[in-house]
Amino acid sequence: MLLNKFKTPVAPTLCSESSDGFVVRKARSLGRSESLQVRASASAEGTGWLDSASTEGTGWLDSASTKFGKVASFVERKLEEVREEFTHEVVEYFGTAVIMKKLQMLEIIDRVADIQDDTSELVGGKRVTVQLISTNIDPRMKSAIPTGCIIIPKLESAPIWNCTNVSRYTAKLLVHGTELSKVMNILWLKLDLQTQVKL
Amino acid sequence: MMSNKEIFPGWPALEGMAIQNVVFQLRFTVSKTFGVPGAIIVHNGHPNEFLLISFNLELPDRSTAHYVTESWVYNTEKTDGRIFFRNKVCTSQSRVDFRSQESLDPIA
């Protein structure tokens, strides 16, 4: 922006003009002058700030007060040109976001956790371990379903409960489905929730 | 100032079974006077939450701006979104400047 020359209570007393812009000098008190920051350059090299010291003696105007308005309007016009120029210049930022989506496996984990809580209540508040077992990992589970297994025929359907014969405090969750089995090969998800629920 | 919104591409197709980190490349176009973004705002229109593990921004000078994330982003339909700030070190000189500014402009 065009400095703070319009906000200062002291009127500028001197202005200097250069090829790139203007320098405004104000006087705070007698015998003491203070240079203001001046928005100067609008050249192809970019914008910059000049101070009065760097342009000392290079064309100070005799009566800056009378020409201040012209100077200001000229600088403002140049500022507008620069502003328009910048609005057309854009820059691109490339961002990389790494996320972990709550995938279906997490939803299964939540479901298993719910099952574990319910199972714990069914077995009298004893310690219950819920374990996910893939049929691909343990082929014996395909034909022989041990007592106490909780069967989910399909992932999309609601769990079918068969907890009446639970004799052990380990409830096994048998999940059918090839995709999940592949995942199980990797994760071998085993939940040991160890919930203690008293009767 | 705020930039345009960028949507995570291919989000609905991410229905795999396994837990995995998913990397998204996003491109933001802003005015040259925008400067280095100090924060990002993340909206989640999905009912389920997701974990924003990290977010980095490649700057024009080839440096990288890091933003402090590692947080679950829940559905933000009823909020203004989650905001994550840039992890930028505040130098001692900057603190001095801020303190000087505070001393000049005391809170009434």
Image (cartoon, rainbow, N blue to C red):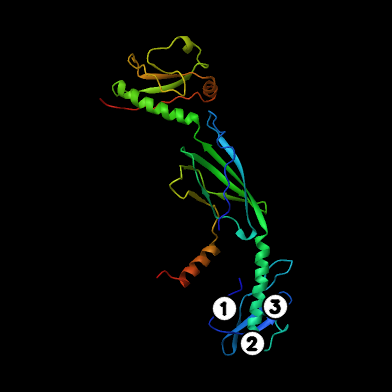
Q: Which of these two is toward me, A196 or B10? A: B10
Does A76 appear above or below B90?
Answer: below
Q: Residues within 10 Å of mark 2 (few under 14, many from 20)?
A: few
Label 1: element kind? loop
Q: Amino acid at mark 2?
A: Thr
Residue assigned mark 1? A6
For disc 2, the chain is A
Can residue A61 be seen at all in this image of the molecule?
A: yes
User: Does label 1 lie on the same chain as label 3?
Assistant: yes
Q: Amino acid at mark 3?
A: Ser
Q: Is residue A164 left or right of residue B4?
A: left
Q: Is residue A69 left or right of residue A194?
A: right
Q: Residues within 10 Å of mark 3 (few under 14, many from 20)?
A: few
Instruction: Classify residue A27 by image quadrant.
Output: bottom right
Q: Nearer the viewer, mark 3 or mark 1?
A: 1
Can residue A39 be seen at all in this image of the molecule?
A: no
> x and y percent of residue B98 in the render?
50, 65
> x and y percent of residue A177 in the render?
51, 19
Label 3: element kind? helix
**Res. B79 mark:** none
Q: Residues within 10 Å of mark 1 (few under 14, many from 20)?
A: few
Residue assigned mark 3? A54
Does A123 appear above or below B101?
Answer: above
> From mark 3 to mark 1, how far is it between C-alphas?
22 Å
Q: Is residue B34 left or right of residue B76?
A: right
Please report the residue visible at 65 percent of the width from the left and 66 percent of the height from the top: A83
Q: Nearer the viewer, mark 3 or mark 2?
A: 2
Residue assigned mark 2? A66
